[in-house]
């Protein structure tokens, strides 16, 4: 792509991602349809794939500059119900990215060591370094989701009893907002994704996991049990997004019943984030230029 094409592409990416971006507390989950594909139909699928491929190559370029510049870090967080497509969205969108500049971490049920610390600790030690893209597959947001839906997880956290009050969720939202403000002030760009799949589509995907041998490994009986808490989860997601969506750390609530659409929106949002940084390769100093010229001369006259 030449520079005009790149500019147009970034503009289109921004437009595509915008309807799904949440930056304040006005958000309502019921306004997002998991089946939504904007004006695109399944006939546009090949175009969407093409756009994703172009996006991936642009992302490769932007990441190269991010790495060379070594100033900003990018933190992308993914949250979703099971089978919403977190893994495949991460895989597709980041497929062109140099593994050296990218760190992916999946957060599972906390270990004993992790439970001996404050709730942000295990995520803090895995934050991306400058010049890197860090991906959190689940994150400290689980602390306001699964931990809220299943109170026994909170009990396991060894918090002093007098600190566990009815305000605990509001306090966690506040701590998360402050933490993200702090990170932003230190050059960490934050984008958060909730892949919003419908209960019906989740059922279909679970059945595929049971019926198709190569998907059997993905099936977990516990995932079926979690479905019983669907409404509680949706309530927790809505509260979480309303309380933690900000201009500097927006949520993207991405329709997830159609995987091809999910990937395009996530890709567009990541491009939007990186292109907002005005990345460029470090300018080489006069001394360095002299050094390069001298090195060239040496190489050319030598054998
Ligand atoms: P997969 O697509 O492979 O199923 P996954 O992200 O669902 O990926 P699992 O190992 O199945 O990975 O699940 C991780 C589990 O850890 C989830 O059920 C999640 O709710 C749970 N978990 C994550 N963070 C916390 C936390 N802070 N407290 C309690 N449970 C947590
Ligand atoms: Mg799982």
Image: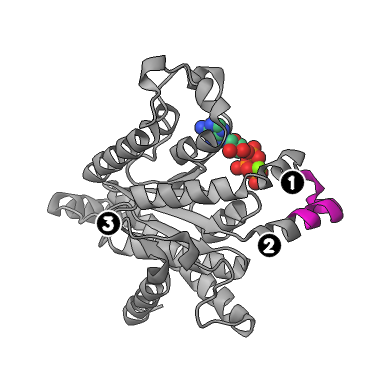
On whether ligand 1 comes within 8 Å of the CB at mark 1, the answer is yes
- The residue to which callout 3 is attached is 247
- The residue to which callout 1 is attached is 218
Q: Secondary structure at mark 2?
A: helix
Distance, label 3 to label 1, CA atoms, is 36 Å
The region drawn magenta spans: 206-219
Residue 214 painted magenta? yes
Against 39, residue 71 (above or below) is above
The residue at 42%/61% (across/down) is 28
Q: Which quadrant of the rendered structure holds the N terminus?
A: bottom left
Can you tell which of label 2 and label 1 is closer to the viewer? Answer: 2
Image position, residue 73 (x, y; %): 33, 46
Can you tell which of label 3 and label 1 is closer to the viewer? Answer: 3
Q: Which residue, as the protein is rendered here, is positioned at the far front?
A: 166
Q: Residues within 10 Å of mark 2 (few under 14, many from 20)?
A: some
Q: Residues within 10 Å of mark 3 (few under 14, many from 20)?
A: few
In this rendered view, identify the residue nearer to me: 221 or 225: 225
- The residue to which callout 2 is attached is 201
């Amino acid at each position: 792509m030449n520079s005009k094409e790149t500019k147009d592409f970034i503009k289109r990416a921004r437009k595509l991602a915008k309807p799904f971006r949440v930056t304040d507390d006005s958000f309502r989950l019921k306004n997002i349809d998991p089946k939504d594909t904007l004006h695109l139909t399944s006939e546009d699928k090949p175009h969407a794939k093409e756009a994703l491929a172009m996006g991936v190559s642009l992302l490769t370029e932007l990441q190269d500059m991010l790495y060379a510049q070594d100033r900003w870090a990018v933190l992308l967080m993914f949250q979703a119900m099971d089978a919403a497509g977190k893994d495949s969205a991460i895989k597709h969108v980041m497929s062109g990215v140099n593994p050296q500049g990218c760190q992916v971490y999946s957060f599972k049920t906390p270990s004993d060591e992790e439970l001996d610390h404050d709730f942000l600790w295990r995520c803090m030690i895995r934050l991306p370094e400058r010049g890197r893209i860090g991906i959190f597959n689940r994150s400290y947001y689980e602390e306001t989701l699964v931990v809220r839906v299943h109170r026994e997880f909170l009990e396991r956290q060894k918090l002093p009893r007098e600190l566990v009050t009815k305000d605990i969720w509001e306090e966690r939202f506040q701590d998360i907002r402050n933490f993200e403000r702090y990170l932003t002030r230190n050059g960490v760009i934050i984008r958060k994704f909730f892949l919003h799949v419908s209960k019906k589509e989740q059922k279909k995907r679970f059945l595929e996991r049971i019926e198709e041998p190569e998907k059997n490994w993905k099936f977990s009986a516990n995932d079926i049990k979690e479905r019983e808490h669907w409404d509680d989860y949706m309530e927790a997601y809505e509260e979480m997004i309303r309380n933690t969506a900000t201009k500097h750390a927006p949520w993207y609530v991405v329709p997830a019943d159609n995987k091809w659409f999910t990937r395009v929106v996530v890709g567009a949002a990541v491009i939007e984030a990186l292109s907002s940084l005005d990345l460029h390769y470090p300018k080489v100093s006069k001394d360095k230029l002299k050094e390069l010229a001298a090195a060239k001369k040496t190489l050319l006259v030598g054998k």
